[in-house]
Amino acid sequence: MAEEEKILSRQTRSLDTPEGPLELRVEQVEPTPQQVVTLTPRQERQVKASAQGLESLLSRYGGSAGSTSWDLEALDFCFRRWLDDPEPDRPGDQRVIEVLGSAFGEYLVQHLDMNWVLVTDEYGTDFAVRGSLTDTMTFPYSVVSKRVEAREHTFFVPVYRAIEDTLEQRGDQTTGVTN
């Protein structure tokens, strides 16, 4: 969850994806005691309400505007256009993190059989999604926040593929299954 975590090992490996080869950097960090709880109904509503803000961003920045369905490429396109938007009324960083983080998390829940959880450790509390069969977790808001800070784009698909591969490696998923 935090940059202060001690890295025990680093490994790089290549993953073949439908979009082409992907270089994965895998880091094993020192275990940190965590409390993981499922979201309350109110927190679940909050996440879903934030994800619904995606329609407004897609309307402004392109992608799947006006559609009830969207894909990760649309999130990448929208994010890149937002980064390049010089207008003073552009949505703020926190709003984009909230909306795209929620939407990405919901995508993971729907397509990789993950569930929203709240994780608390010595560094603080954050929303995460966790595989339904193992403790594999990712932090969708942090995924977006790091890219806002780095001004890095075109990351949703590669991050998704890395998560999908990790779940398959750990037995959370059968290869190719989407829900």
Image: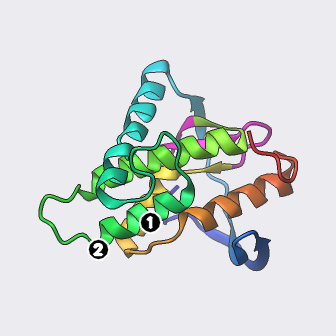
- Magenta stretch, main secondary structure class: strand
Q: Residues within 10 Å of mark 1 (few under 14, many from 20)?
A: some
* Stretch in magenta: 117-136
Q: Which of 45/33 is in front? A: 45
Q: Is residue 53 left or right of residue 87?
A: right
The spot of residue 161 in percent (x, y) is: 69, 62
**Residue where numbered disc 1 is placed:** 77
CB within 8 Å, label 2 to label 1? no
Under mark 1, the amino acid is Phe
> Regarding mark 2 in the picture, which secondary structure is present there?
helix
Q: Earlier in the sequence, mark 2 or mark 1?
A: 1
The image quarter in which residue 107 lies: top right
Cα gap from disc 2 to disc 1, whole angstroms: 11 Å
The spot of residue 81 in percent (x, y) is: 34, 68
As for residue 135 lying within the magenta part, the answer is yes
Q: In this view, does 154 lie to the left or right of 109?
A: left
